[in-house]
């Protein structure tokens, strides 16, 4: 087992990883930018190393600084969390070259699944259903028009190296192709340093349902059931729940088997997620694989009583998994609390938190790195907390979430708490009658 793990991340996920490490008797090293010097993940680590100024490119994306921090502290493994370098094949390879275990996918697995166009081809070969689309990367606008005509409008143009809704454009007719192609290419370059685009058929009235999987170093893969991530805005998730209200036992078995086939096809090692689009007829299509821990992993942990971070560490240390598939025994909902103003087009709201009261009680969990007096820096993602509730049924979980939201007080900055309160009282959400288009017509009051 590892003696010391460097956590190459910040905020709530860094703190989350530290907690499991401490329970496992593993020392931790925090890395931080100068903007995060007062963050809790720095305070609670056994050691902390400043790796640069606030911009991510000079700190949390600075591979040389992170490797150096691991070497000077004698860390024998690096946990990348999510975002930043968590799906960077070059960083995974760099860790390997320096004799440091990367707690995540191998460079080969990241390359085959991290690039969405390549992943789609891999899935076709594995027999996993995929959305009709381009044969690899689009070469130019002419190719985009030809492909759209072949698969039929509406279509969606996507950045091959994308994530978080960046570099995505829905196109309803040929007249929109040129503008959508150019703007997607520009945004992809700015966001990922990679302007490659591909195209897929745009699935109408879809659900975004993902299957959590775990694979060990000996070829065994199991699934841990599903999460419904359909409540999202501009392709960024706002709220997730497990299980999905749209799921049937038969569909869960089909999707679980497809997810295992997908992961097995690349001999996947570690914790990962196979994301699917599910249409109104309950036909599902592979969308992408995330070769890392997900933001929304706590709801899976709560419904099956399973520490996913611990499992990541065990797998990385060469310990085999049981191979057993897990099924939800309870119902959990997670709301992402962002420092944004939902009444002003979700404008980021960094600044000092003057007052904070976190909800508690049975079945309530808050994952956060903020506290009263903490100043939210403007340099990073706006998520400052995750509120997770778990209960026996979906109805009970919704009631519990309402109660917890009413207790959650954050003052000094604007947050999305009012949005979540409204969603919990929305008739369509309560009925489980929603798709990824839910927020398109949602009126914030």
Image: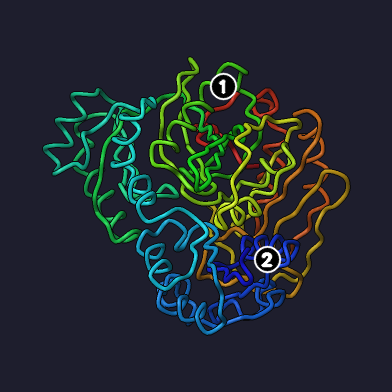
Q: Residues within 10 Å of mark 1 (few under 14, many from 20)?
A: some
- Rendered view: 212 above or below 54: above
Residue shown at the point (61%, 18%) measured from the top left: 248
Q: What is the x, y in percent for residue 306?
A: 71, 44
The image quadrant that residue 240 belongs to is top right
Q: Quadrant of the C terminus?
A: top right
According to the image, what is the colour scheme of the structure? rainbow
SS at mark 1?
helix
**Is 276 displayed left or right of 34 in the figure?**
left
- Rendered view: 259 above or below 341: above
Residue shown at the point (67%, 47%) measured from the top left: 298
Residue shown at the point (70%, 77%) measured from the top left: 43
- Rendered view: 318 above or below 66: above
**Is 137 displayed left or right of 257 in the figure?**
left
Q: What is the x, y in percent for residue 255?
A: 51, 25
Q: What is the x, y in percent for residue 161?
A: 33, 51
The image quadrant that residue 15 belongs to is bottom right
Residue shown at the point (50%, 35%) measured from the top left: 440
Q: Which residue is mark 2?
A: 18
Marks 1 and 2, the one that precedes in the sequence = 2
Q: Which residue is mark 1?
A: 253
Which residue sits furthest left? 142
Q: What is the x, y in percent for residue 194?
A: 27, 57
Q: Does residue 351 show up?
A: no
Q: CA distance from mark 1 to mark 2?
A: 34 Å
Q: Quadrant of the N terminus?
A: bottom right
Q: Does residue 262 show up?
A: yes
Number of numbered labels in the structure image: 2
SS at mark 2?
helix
């Amino acid at each position: 087992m590892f003696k010391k793990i460097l956590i190459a991340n910040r905020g709530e996920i860094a703190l989350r990883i530290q907690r499991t490490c401490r329970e496992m008797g593993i020392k931790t090293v925090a890395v931080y930018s100068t903007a995060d010097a007062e963050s809790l993940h720095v305070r609670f680590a056994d050691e902390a190393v400043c790796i640069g100024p606030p911009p991510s490119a000079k700190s949390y994306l600075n591979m040389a600084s992170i490797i150096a921090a691991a070497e000077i502290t004698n860390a024998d493994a690096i946990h990348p969390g999510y975002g930043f370098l968590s799906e960077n094949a070059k960083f995974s390879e760099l860790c390997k070259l320096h004799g440091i275990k990367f707690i995540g996918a191998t460079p080969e697995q990241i390359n085959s699944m991290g690039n969405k166009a390549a992943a789609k081809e891999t899935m076709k070969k594995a027999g996993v259903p995929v959305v009709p689309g381009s044969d690899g990367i689009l070469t130019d606008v002419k190719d985009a028009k030809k492909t759209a005509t072949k698969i039929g409008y509406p279509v969606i143009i996507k950045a091959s190296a994308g994530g978080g809704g960046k570099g995505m454009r829905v196109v309803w007719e040929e007249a929109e192709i040129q503008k959508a192609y150019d703007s997607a290419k520009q945004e992809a370059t700015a966001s990922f340093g990679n302007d490659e685009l591909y195209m897929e058929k745009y699935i109408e009235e879809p659900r975004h349902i993902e299957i959590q999987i775990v694979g060990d170093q000996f070829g065994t893969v199991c699934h841990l059931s599903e999460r419904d991530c359909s409540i999202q805005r501009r392709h960024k998730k706002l709220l997730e729940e497990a299980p999905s209200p749209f799921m049937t036992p038969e569909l869960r078995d089909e999707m679980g088997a497809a997810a295992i086939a997908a992961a097995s096809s690349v001999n996947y090692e570690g914790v990962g997620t196979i994301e699917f689009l599910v249409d109104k007829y309950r036909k599902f299509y592979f969308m992408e694989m995330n070769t890392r821990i997900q933001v929304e992993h706590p709801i899976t942990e709560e419904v099956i009583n399973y520490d996913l971070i611990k499992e990541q560490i065990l797998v990385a240390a060469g310990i085999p998994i049981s191979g057993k598939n897990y099924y939800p025994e309870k119902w959990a909902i997670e709301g992402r609390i962002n420092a944004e103003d939902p009444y002003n087009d979700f404008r980021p709201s960094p600044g000092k938190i003057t007052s904070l009261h976190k909800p508690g009680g049975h079945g309530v969990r808050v994952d956060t790195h903020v506290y009263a007096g903490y100043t939210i820096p403007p340099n990073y993602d706006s998520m400052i907390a995750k509120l997770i509730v778990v209960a026996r049924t979906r109805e009970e979980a919704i009631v519990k979430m309402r109660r917890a939201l009413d207790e959650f007080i954050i003052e000094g900055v604007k947050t999305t708490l009012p949005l979540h309160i409204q969603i919990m009282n929305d008739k369509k959400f309560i009925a489980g009658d929603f798709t990824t288009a839910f927020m398109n017509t949602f009126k914030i009051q």
